[in-house]
Amino acid sequence: MPGLRNSDERHWQSAWQNLLPGSQRIEVIDWHLADLEKWRNAILKTLTSLEQPVLLIAHSFGSLASASIAHDYPSLVRGALLVAPAAPQKFGIEERLPQTEIARPLRLIGSDSDPWLAETGAKQLAHQWGADFHISKGKGHINSESQLGVWTEGLFELEKLLQQIDKHLVQSTAGLSKTHPGVLHTVSLAHKK
């Protein structure tokens, strides 16, 4: 789930979409309009068309909309990687976002040089939502301008999240199954290349 203005071909999300099998970009009607309800509806439309819960990988405003969906519709979401969320106050939506922990494995990655949300704000959102927190050094808004390519640091954080999801699935299914279809293996292979 990209942020405002979508993720162009230089964005790490576009690289990941090509790298991770089964990836699908959620499309919104207007990438230039930060309308939380319209973005939530776009996510819901996609998730309800799928046969199983998904892992959301979101950036900026997309992270805010994804956190909202993960909170309100946990049966549709296995977990979420929330990268460089934008400051909810910039859009006047702080009261419409989850005020309590989200009952799914989450990792929130902030940047110590993000102009859209200071490190302290990212840390506060992670605490509020019960997300594991990682700070990326000197990456700005962790977007195309950051020139990250495939963004290996992010892939390592994704792998940590996938391990959390596996652990969560084991606990919630009393050990029936430890894995979900091949994503962790794919990410592990990406690290070895």
Image (spheres, rainbow, N blue to C red):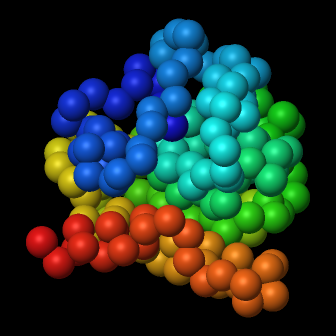
Residue 172 position, x and y percent, is: 81, 78
Q: Residue at x 79, y 80 (%)?
A: 173
Residue 8 position, x and y percent, is: 27, 28
Residue 3 position, x and y percent, is: 48, 32
The C terminus: image quadrant? bottom left
Residue situated furthest bottom in the rendering:
175
Q: Is residue 161 left or right of residue 45?
A: left
Q: Is residue 48 left or right of residue 13?
A: right
Dividing the picture into quadrants, the one containing residue 107 is bottom right
Q: Residue at x 75, y 42 (%)?
A: 68
Q: Is residue 152 left or right of residue 133?
A: left
84 or 175, nearer to the observer: 175
70 or 23, nearer to the observer: 23
40 or 125, nearer to the observer: 40
Residue 74 position, x and y percent, is: 80, 53
Dividing the picture into quadrants, the one containing residue 55 is bottom right
The number of numbered discs placed on residues in the rendered structure image is 0
Q: Is residue 150 above or below residue 15?
A: below
Q: Residue at x 66, y 81 (%)?
A: 177
Task: Answer yes or no: is residue 117 visible.
Answer: no
Residue situated furthest left in the rendering:
193
Task: Answer yes or no: is residue 115 visible.
Answer: yes
Q: Is residue 90 left or right of residue 129?
A: left
Q: Residue at x 52, y 30 (%)?
A: 26
Q: Is residue 39 above or below residue 147?
A: above
